[in-house]
Amino acid sequence: MPRCLVIDSSEIVRKVASRIIETLDYTVSETASVNDAVSMCQQKMPDVILIDWHFRGADTHEIVRSIRKSESAKHPYIIYCTTENDPVDIAQAMSSGADDHILKPFDRAALESKFALVPLTTN
């Protein structure tokens, strides 16, 4: 079963996203901690990462870049999750290594459409 890591400072967003993603036949882990997220990726890289755009004291774009620089054989599909429809910020996220973006608040249909684009491979 493919794995997804939800990284968001909001417990509500994490729970809602996790419940929806689990119905798409993913095993879901979640965290509000950037340090825990990095550690989890180092232990076993997920297939998909849903990452919030803002963390106090952390640069989301740098986190995405560090995941991309990881020596893992797996190249996770990263969905940048934002509340702002700012084309400059979204472009920066994409150039940092995000594969796609989604606007919050999202619903089941929005998440399903993003996850339908995930190219799953067996690594």
Image (cartoon, rainbow, N blue to C red):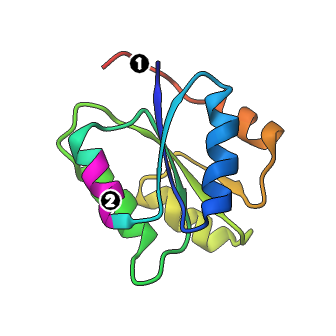
Please state which amino acid type lies under the numbered disc 2. Answer: Asp
In magenta segment, residue 23: no
Instruction: Kindly identify the residue that appears in the image at 73 percent across and 33 percent down.
Output: 112
Q: Position of residue 83 (x, y in %)?
A: 71, 69
Please state which amino acid type lies under the numbered disc 1. Answer: Thr
Start and end of the magenta stretch? Answer: 35-40
Label 2 element class: helix
24 vs 26, left or right, is right
Q: Is tag 1's residue or tag 2's residue first in the polypeptide sequence? A: 2
113 vs 46, left or right, is right
Crowding at mark 2 (Cα within 10 Å: few <14, some 14-19, many 20+): few
Q: Is residue 114 visible?
A: no
Q: Are marks 1 and 2 in contact (CB under 8 Å)?
A: no
Instruction: Kindly identify the residue that appears in the image at 54 percent across and 68 percent down.
Output: 9
Q: What is the CA distance from the residue labelled 1 to the residue labelled 2?
A: 25 Å
Instruction: Kindly identify the residue that appears in the image at 74 percent across and 34 percent down.
Output: 113
Q: Which mark is residue 121?
A: 1
For label 2, the residue is: 36
Instruction: Kindly identify the residue that appears in the image at 30 percent across and 48 percent down.
Output: 40
Q: Position of residue 30 (x, y in %)?
A: 48, 50
- How many numbered marks have been drawn onto this rendered protein structure? 2
Q: Is residue 29 visible?
A: yes
| Vertical arrangement, residue 10 with respect to residue 25, above or below | below
In magenta segment, residue 37: yes
Of circles 1 and 2, the one toward us is: 2
**Image quadrant in which the C terminus is located:** top left
Q: Position of residue 118 (x, y in %)?
A: 56, 29
Label 1 element class: loop
Q: Quadrant of residue 81?
A: bottom right
